[in-house]
Amino acid sequence: MKNILLIAFISVFTFSFGQDEKCIAIKQSSTTLNTDYFIGYDSFGYYYSIKNNVLSKNNTKESFEYKNVSLGKPTKIDIQNPLKIMLFYENFNTAILLDNQLSETQKINFSENDIPIVANAAGIASQNRLWVYNSLTQKLGFFDYLKNTIQTLTPSLSGNLKYYETSFTTFQWIDDQLNWYSCDVFGKITTLGKIADFDQIQIISNQEIVFLKDGKLFLQDLKTNSIYTIENVEKSFKNFFYKDQILSIFTNQEITNYKITIP
């Protein structure tokens, strides 16, 4: 009995210690940006943002803009491929593809497809395809935007999508019960774990997330079952973006970049 109590105590202590761990952010630089919402930056150093439903892409030398008055504000903007950017307008069941100068190259209205699609999620995949979650079937699949065909990858998913992110090879999502899943290009679904509740979130690996809750930033590592408080950052901000160990905080028309080392 004593051994059982000791093990239980050690388990609770370990988890609590993980929650009390701190991740110190070191300020690197700051950039003025007159916008409403900061999206992120690409590997070429361009910053992407939204102001008055206009998408902007700019650096110190040049800038580009795209707006679509009829569709309004995009629900999701995918900038993982700077040469092919996707804007998803969930309310209009439509995705727009842009080139590297934010010129429209293709408009995809899922409502016009031969197979009924009501997309709740969309993102750039490989080989002229988009990841698409069809709420009519609750299935995830690939939409080939050159052939206008859809390939179903999964059986019907349980739960509702609370958040999702895509890469060329994976679709990751968090459901309304805070369960985290990943699907690869072959339709294999992997359960990654249970995460903490959040107000904003970004997936940074297949076991780590950065999230905002009640005005504070945290890093959760599912491998070690630890939650780290990110300290030494701005106390009040609109949103954040993480890439290559740089945490960018968008405050009132300014982006501050911090170097953080994942524990």
Image: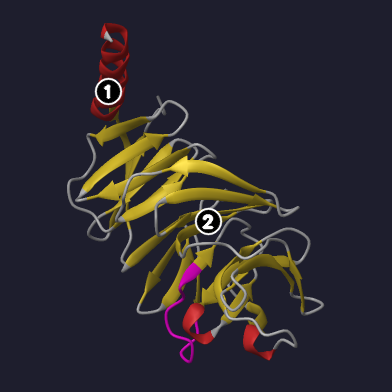
Where is the N terminus found, in terms of image quarters? Answer: top left
x and y percentages locating residue 220 in the rendered image = 38, 36
Hey, which quadrant is residue 38 in on the image? bottom left
x and y percentages locating residue 262 in the rendered image = 42, 29
Q: CA distance from mark 1 to mark 2?
A: 32 Å
Circle 2 residue? 165
What predominant SS class does the magenta segment belong to?
Answer: loop
What residue is shown at x 59% (from left), y 49% (from top)? Answer: 182
Nearer the observer, 213 or 188? 188
Please tell me whether residue 66 is drawn above or below residue 154 in the rendered image.
below
Horizontal side of residue 127 vs 243, given as left or right: right
Residue 68 appearing in the image: yes
Horizontal side of residue 217 vs 186, given as left or right: left
Q: Which mark is residue 92?
A: none
* First of labels 1, 2 by sequence position: 1
Label 1 packing within 10 angstroms: few (<14), some (14-19), many (20+): few
Q: Which residues are magenta?
A: 67-76
Label 2 packing within 10 angstroms: few (<14), some (14-19), many (20+): many
Please tell me whether residue 82 is drawn above or below residue 18 in the rendered image.
below
The residue furthest right is 147
Nearer the observer, 235 or 52? 235
Circle 1 residue? 12
x and y percentages locating residue 162 in the rendered image = 42, 62
What residue is shown at x 50% (from left), y 56% (from top)? Answer: 46
Nearer the observer, 121 or 247? 121
